Amino acid sequence: MVLRLMLSCRGGDFRVIVSTMKILVVDDHPVLREGISALLRQDGTDTVVLQAESGVDALEVIKQNADIDIVVLDLMLPDMGGMEAMSEFAKIRPELPVIILSSSEDPRDARNAFANGALGYVPKSSSRYALLSAIKLVLNGDLYVPRVLLDAGVDARIEAFASQGHGDTQLTPRQIEVLRLISDGSPNKTIASELGLSEKTVKAHITAIFKVLKVVNRTQAALAGRKAGLI
C-alpha cells in the first residue's frame, strides 16, 4: 500500500504518521521516463515520482530529496553508466535501494548489477507489472531477480546478493532488535510501531541485515541470526 499509516506511541503520546512513496526515475529518454512515471502514479494516488535524465542530475535530486524511497535506474546513461551511478548514490544515501531497468537481458549484466549494489533488475521487455512487483518486493526488504538470471542457475539469486562487497561487517544494536522481531514473524509495520521507527527506516535496516548476513529473505535472516548467536 502506497499510503502508509502508522500509530506510534512514545511516552504516552499517540501519533498517526502519514507518508507517501517517493520514487526517482533516471533515464535519458523523455518518453520512456514519462511512461514509467505515469505507470507508477497509477499504482497509487499518493506516489510522488521525480525524474532525472542523467547520473549527475540524479545525484542532485537525491541530495535535495532525503526522503526518496527507491531509485529506478537505466543501465546506460549519457554521462555515466548505471554501475558508476549506483556507486555515487551510495556515497550520499548508502541505504537507498536501486532497481536497474535495462534493455539488456544478458544474465551477466544482471549479475554485475547485483554485485554492484542493485536490489532489483528489470529488463525493459518485461510486462509493466514486473516493475511494480519489483518495487514492492525491494521495499519489503527482498530482492527482485528476473527470469533471465534465475534461468542461469538455481543459486544465482543467493550468489548475486552474497557477492556484494560493500556494507558494514557487523550488525548494529538496532539492527539486531529488528532481526529479533523478524525472527518472531513480525511485519514491517509492527516492527516500526514496536521500535518507534518509520517503515522506511525499518526497510533500510532489513536491507542492511540481509547484506551483512548474506541472505535474501527474512527466513534465512532469522536462521543466520540464530546460528550466529545474535538472537
Image (cartoon, rainbow, N blue to C red):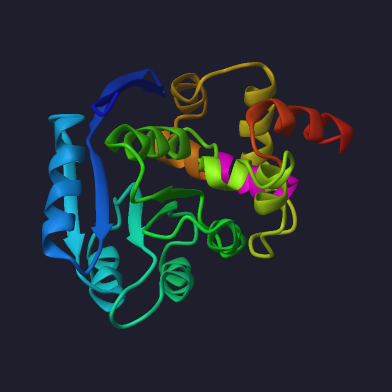
Out of 41 and 36, give the one closest to the viewer.
36
Numbered marks: total:
0
Classify 14 as above or below 130: above
Residue 64's place in the image compared with 15, above or below, is: below
Residue 21 locus on image (x, y percent): 25, 39
**Who's the residue at 53% across and 40% down the image?**
147
Please tell me which residue is depicted at 57% across the width and 39% down the height of the picture.
206
Taking depth in this image into account, of 36 and 192 the one nearest to the observer is 36
Which of the 4 image quadrants contains residue 178?
Answer: top right
Return the x and y of residue 10 as percentages of the image width and height.
41, 25
Residue 158 occupies quadrant: top right
Give the main secondary structure, helix, strand or loop, of the magenta stretch: helix
- Quadrant in which the N terminus appears: top left
In-image side of 223 versus 195 (left or right): right
Magenta segment: 205-214
Q: Position of residue 134 (x, y in %)?
A: 41, 38
Q: Residue at x 17, y 44 (%)?
A: 48
Q: Residue at x 57, y 65 (%)?
A: 116
Quarter of the image for the C terminus: give it.
top right
Residue 123: x %, y % from top left: 40, 50
Q: Is residue 198 visible?
A: no
Q: Is residue 117 shown above or below 19? A: below
Which residue is at the front of the view, 162 or 21? 162
Q: Is residue 134 visible?
A: yes
Magenta-drawn stretch contains 145: no
Is residue 151 shown left or right of residue 76? right
